[in-house]
Image (spheres, rainbow, N blue to C red):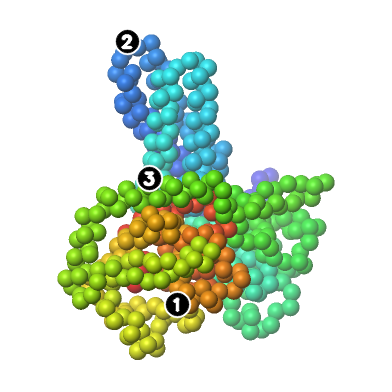
Amino acid sequence: MTVLNILTPERRARYDVRSGRHEQVRAYIRALVVADAVAALAGALAAYAWHPDGSDSANLQIFPLRLAVALMPPFWALALWLHRAYDRRRVSMDPELYRKVLGASGLLAAGAATGALLIDSMALFRLVIVSIPLAAALTPIARSLARAGLSRAGHSAERRRVLLVGHARSVEEFAAQVRPNRAPWLKIVGACLVGPTEPHEADNLAISVQGDLGSVVESATAMDCDAVVVLNCPELDGSALRDLSWRLHEQNIDLAIVPVLVGVAVERILVDTVDGLPMMHIRAPILSGPVRMVKEGFERAVAALALALLSPVLLVLAALVRLTSPGPALFRQVRVGLNGTEFECLKFRTMVADAERLREQLEHLNEKNDGVLFKIRRDPRITRVGRVLRKCSLDELPQLVNVLRGEMSLVGPRPPLPEEAARYSEQVRRRLAVKPGLTGLWQVSGRSMLSWDESVRLDLSYVENWSPQLDAKILLRTTSAVVRGTGAF
């Protein structure tokens, strides 16, 4: 007797729906594997064509080179698989793809270099050194094209349906933080509330309440959930969680647990066991040391090069500002930087010359009611040229001078005004532990559309979880944010 024969009609229908959804996910994974293989093959062929030995058919090293080209796609896919790049929970979008690609590149490079040394082939070593970076660069592009093709063909990897379990406040905070643009692979379909809950708390939730702690499995099954996420919940001890996991797994539903400690990057967490008990070690944030010195030196060099290359553009923009509005081309404003040090932040002037004087008259139009930020979507003080500069973020190019001076970084928290910094709590002052940046998490996550609290949370997350990989990811996302112009006003 098969499994389907002993299922009730309702459970059989849910089984069929979930099986169909899983098949869509498997189709996506197969497409990603093919896309990665094509990217690896393209990188290997490009390296082979460029290689000085590639066109010499008489060369005895041709065979190992051609073999390396042929083996590049399967080994590249294997390296990505070892770094969980085919996780079924991330097929629609993987926010950690760049980190996984970087890890796969290092693993494959180490293995290929070892093989090249064993057979004493510098030609093979040079081929690998060129082909792996090319494959890494082409992989995100190939994956985007594969997803676009699947979408046009009518295939879609649906978001994982999730049921939340926890206290009303925890559920509300989690749902507010995990918005669709932040976690497009998740779809919160309901919640089971734990503990005493006031009627107004349940009514104010934007999520439908399905039950309490005793109805988690039934609610998750009825709503055809793929996973149950347990938030900070003292009522669920280790024994209760184990029992819940068994009952959920019988229904083919995953169980995930959100720890009390949130906002810490995975790279800073080391999981260990003490006599069978799991223990998380949190590494200290990197606020100084050799890595920070390398970051500063690299950013100053990039700023100097960018200023040299963009000098004609900067001169044209300065002339446009001067010719279209009376006043100086640059707007100079005192901002607060590293450890509370004040500096003069440079921008192209995008407002009329007496904009600060007019601010009091426009206070009633402020869209930020947090008492800290002042933002108006249709600010009448902004000039026509200034509006274009802001939309394209070109007004911030003079801050490359601040980076060159060592007052700012390319990537970092938003530089606050002195009056803002004066009102910082002890926790918020941690934003000043690093240099402010020309771009940052705040810019690639909505810019002016963010609330004060959200801006602070993102900046503190950057300070606490900084790494060179995070900077690289933000710089890549900045290009996309500037092109879209989202949140710029």
Three-letter residue code for mark 1: Leu
The reply to whether residue 13 is in sight is no
Image location (x, y in percent) of residue 365? 38, 85
Circle 1 SS class: loop
Please report whichever mark, 1 or 2, sits nearer to the chain's N-terminal start: 2
Check the picture and name the quadrant holding the N terminus: top right
Q: Please state if 297 lies on the left or on the right of 190 as rendered.
A: left
The reply to whether the C-beta atoms of the residues labelled 1 and 2 are less than 8 Å apart is no
| Mark pair 1, 3: CA separation | 37 Å
Label 3 packing within 10 angstroms: few (<14), some (14-19), many (20+): few
Tag 3 residue: 141
| Circle nearer the viewer, 2 or 3 | 2
171 w.r.t. 111: above or below: below
Residue pictured at 49% horizontal, 66% vertical: 341
Circle 3 SS class: helix
Q: Please state if 146 lies on the left or on the right of 290 as rendered.
A: left
Q: Please state if 302 lies on the left or on the right of 310 as rendered.
A: right
Front residue of 283/34: it is 283
Front residue of 347/269: it is 347
Residue pictured at 41% horizontal, 71% vertical: 334
Image location (x, y in percent) of residue 379? 32, 80
Residue pictured at 72% horizontal, 66% vertical: 233
**Residue 373 numbered tag:** 1
Front residue of 464/252: it is 464
Please report whichever mark, 2 or 3, sits nearer to the chain's N-terminal start: 2
Tag 2 residue: 58
Circle 2 SS class: loop
Q: Quadrant of residue 430?
A: bottom right
Instruction: Identify the residue at the far right of this view.
Output: 275
**Residue 357 numbered tag:** none
